Image (cartoon, grey):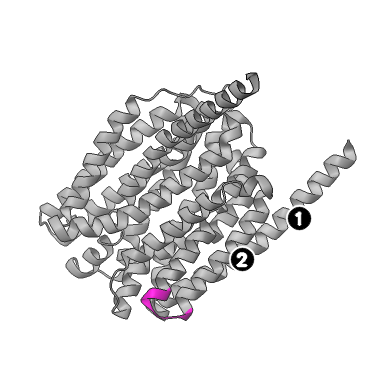
Amino acid sequence: MGEVSVLNQQKDQAAGSHWLILSIVGFNFISYVCSGLPLAVLPGFVLNDLGQSSIFAGLVISSQYLATLLARPLAGAVADRLGAKLAVVCGFSGLMLSGMLMVLAIVLHAQHWLILTLLLLGRLLLGASTAMISTPCCTWAIGLCGSSRSAQVMSWNGIAAYGGTAVGAPLGVLLQNSLGLFSVGLCTVLLGLAFLLLALSKRSAPIVAGARLAFHRVFLTVMPNGMVLVCSSVGFGGLTAFVALYFGSQGWDHAAYCLSGFGVGFIFARLTSPGLLQRFRGYKVVGGCLFVQTLGMLLIWLVPSPVIAIAGGVLTGIGVSWVYPGLGVETLASTPAANRNSALSALSLFFDIAVGMAGPIMGLIASGFGYAAIFLCAALMSMGGILIVACLCRRATESNLQAIDNK
């Protein structure tokens, strides 16, 4: 009877931890819903309504990721020193302001340069707000549930991020078709307000004591893993910024379904292989994922068909699924607990660098070689990531063997 009671207690504790993690990473889900809302509708607005080039369309989308990049150090510092909850509250406040700027840009009917400026400001604020929510959500949940839940938290936080994008993109199209483009910004305002109030009601995680490393030192330590993340994330950046234009150039409809397919593949892989990082080393999982991602991008490039392109998006989502958690586990294993927000923020910074570069650089490639060439370049980057992972895996193995010999 005693053993049964202990088992039941452990099950109750596990269930409680699951719900607590879900309640925190849910904030990240909403932030990415807001990020996904304009993805399938804003490029067409910039191209058709404002008469700008594909480079400007890519810049409007990618400016969000530039802002996220610049805000990562601030998000890590605020979360490490003042608490992850405060960072998330600041993030939702920023989401509300970004939605207001988008509404103003659409309803004012001003000159095109002013509309474009307001859209860019809104995208920059949206990117900074995402930075204040995404990684702090992860460390907030780890702080409440313990470091033993790190892989689970990062896995679910990633599901929330890409799932939010998958929901947000078609929802943005639905809102535009039903109520007009301004409703996309209005929806961001309302979601930001609702979840700001909900975040304020949650309890904070304890702030970990210890020496705080300068962010540039954390950044340099994380850099090898970050370069792998860059190689993976270029594909995601190209897909989000140009899939709608790629579909349009081919005369296809339902570009948002390719983004949704990416999210479905991503979530499917995460949910069907929860113990993957426990069974295999992080670098081995990352290498396998990059191989699958390469196949997905090559499929989109080689076969000009909407169904095949959506299938390629699904395959790419499966490939991307465990890249960040695998690199995150390797990063946290070599980082003091007092700096875990800064370490994960630094790792995420490389994602923002990749996606931020993807917009204008892939726009130039598309201008010279067509939209399909974007996905070939992304496949080549993924292959480069596989080579880096092989080197990191070999170095980690040598370090472990040396540690055993020293004992």
User: Quadrant location of the N terminus?
Assistant: top right
Q: Which residue is mark 2?
A: 384
Observer-nearest of 139 and 146: 146
Residue 205 visible somewhere in the drawing: yes
In the image, which residues are magenta? 302-308
The kind of residue tagged 1 is Arg
User: Quadrant location of the C terminus?
Assistant: top right
Residue 357 visible somewhere in the drawing: no
The kind of residue tagged 2 is Gly
Measured as percent of width and height from the top left, residue 335 is found at: 64, 36
- Count residues near mark 2 (Cα–Cα under 10 Å), then give few for <14, some for 14-19, many for 20+: some
> Of the numbered discs in the image, which one, if any, rests on residue 394?
1
Quarter assignment of residue 178: bottom left
User: Which residue is painted at 53% across and 26% down in the image?
Assistant: 13
| Helix, strand or loop at mark 1 | helix
Left/right placement of residue 175 relative to residue 61 reads: left
| Helix, strand or loop at mark 2 | helix
Measured as percent of width and height from the top left, residue 223 is found at: 61, 49
Q: Between disc 2 and disc 1, whose residue precedes?
A: 2
Measured as percent of width and height from the top left, residue 59 is found at: 34, 61
User: Which residue is painted at 56% across and 53% down in the image?
Assistant: 323
Residue 199 drawn above or below residue 356: above
Left/right placement of residue 370 relative to residue 53 reads: right
Q: CA distance from mark 2 to mark 1?
A: 16 Å
User: Which residue is painted at 58% across and 44% down in the image?
Assistant: 328
